[in-house]
Image (spheres, rainbow, N blue to C red):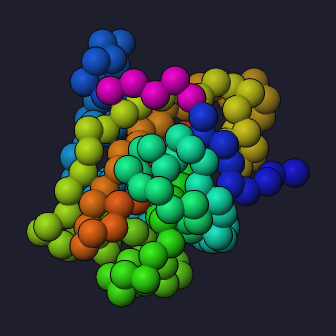
Amino acid sequence: MITFPLSLTASWQRGNTVTTLSQQEQNWLLEPNSLTAKLKRHGRDFSVQVLSEKRFNLSPQQQQLLDCHLSEGINREVLLWCNGEPMVYAQSWLPVTQNMQQQKLLELGDKPLGDVIFQHPELKRTEIEIARFDCHHAVQQLIEQPAQSIKPLWARRSVFSLAHSRFLVCEVFLPKAFIYQ
């Protein structure tokens, strides 16, 4: 049984310091532009499946990453699909404020976050951090696969700033993702 939000606690490292990445892995993990747009360019039949969208208390680590003292946030978890396969599990955390621009981010439905935020020229992003989730991590439960084909999964995260709102986005590349091909 999967419980949301999935914990993405890991040994996160600055992306430009990891020397064991192949060129293909670097191209996907360190992509500075919209991952949604890149998926759409590489695949067909792109769609978003909302897994969970709820209010939660932000952990001290999340508050530190978001540089905020607010205790409540919205957690949104989705699967990004291409070619009939789940490609990316994405999780976003947004502190709850009264900002009207932020309210638009909370009403996405099955629209990808990347389609909204990358339209704004004032969007800022912190340095991308990456991590690797082992074969026993809970994110592995999101996809049906034979036990012998389970492999470690690459992930990335960064904090975005837009209209005085900061939000944390984590993306885990699932086994069928283009990063592994």
Give, as a single range, the part of the protein colored magenta.
10-14
Assess whether residue 98 is covered by the magenta stretch.
Answer: no
Assess whether residue 13 is covered by the magenta stretch.
Answer: yes
Q: Which of 99 and 112 is in front in this view?
A: 99
Considering only vertical position in the picture, is 67 above or below 49? above
Considering only vertical position in the picture, is 154 above or below 125? above
Q: In which quadrant of the rendered view does residue 112 lie?
A: bottom left
Q: Is any part of residue 135 visible from this angle?
A: yes
Position of 52 compared to 86: left or right?
right
Q: In which quadrant of the rendered view does residue 29 lie?
A: top left
Tell me residue 69's x, y (percent).
47, 56
Position of 75 compared to 126: left or right?
right
Q: Nearer the viewer, residue 71 or 149?
A: 71
Considering only vertical position in the picture, is 167 above or below 1? below
Tell me residue 161's x, y (percent).
27, 60
Residue at the right extreme of this rendering? 1
**Most frequent secondary structure within the magenta stretch:** loop
Residue at figure coordinates x 42%, y 44% from the top left: 65
Residue at the left extreme of this rendering? 121
Tell me residue 23's x, y (percent).
26, 24
Image quarter where the C terminus lies is top left
Tell me residue 24's x, y (percent).
30, 30
Residue at figure coordinates x 33%, y 67% from the top left: 165
Q: Is any part of residue 76 visible from this angle?
A: no
